[in-house]
Amino acid sequence: MLTSWIYLILAIIFEVSGTTCMKLSEGFTKIIPSILIFVFYGICFSFLTLSLKRLEISVAYSVWSGLGTTLIASIGIIWFRESMTVMKFISITLIIIGVIGLNSGE
């Protein structure tokens, strides 16, 4: 079971890396980030698939998408100097609450 969570964390890391490369590719005009998008997403989906051997899909997908979204929003704000509005903060908080709710409800 621990191995599945490690796979899920790795899937999140590679998904966030792939999404960050989307921004860095500047619309596929930069070759290295453009190639890395596909490499990182391929690795990401491989780890996500491996995590599903032991984790429920509802748990794995909600954690993967929720944590990935939260991390990408944070990277956008910190690294790419995107604005941090009250609405963004509330929305990110609601995503986190939603993931917790999906994973704790039976």
Image (cartoon, rainbow, N blue to C red):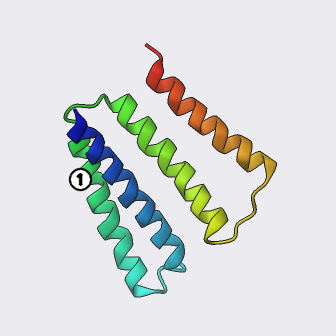
Q: Position of residue 87 (x, y in %)?
A: 77, 46
Report the quarter where the C terminus lies: top left
Report the quarter where the N terminus lies: top left
Q: Is residue 104 above or below residue 15?
A: above
**Which class describes the residues within 10 Å of circle 1: few (<14), some (14-19), or many (20+)?**
some
Q: Position of residue 52 (x, y in %)?
A: 25, 37
Residue at the spot 51% in from the left edge and 77% down from the top edge: 24
Rendering quarter of residue 14 = bottom left
Q: Position of residue 77 (x, y in %)?
A: 66, 63
Residue at the spot 41% in from the left edge and 65% down from the top edge: 18
Residue 23 placement, left or right of 10: right
Residue at the spot 35% in from the left edge and 74% down from the top edge: 36
Residue 76 placement, left or right of 5: right
In the orientation shown, which residue stands out farthest toward the bottom?
30
According to the image, label 1 marks what residue? Answer: 46
Q: Is residue 13 above or below residue 101?
A: below
In the orientation shown, which residue stands out farthest toward the front?
2
Total marks placed: 1
27, 19: nearer the viewer? 19
Residue 50 placement, left or right of 30: left
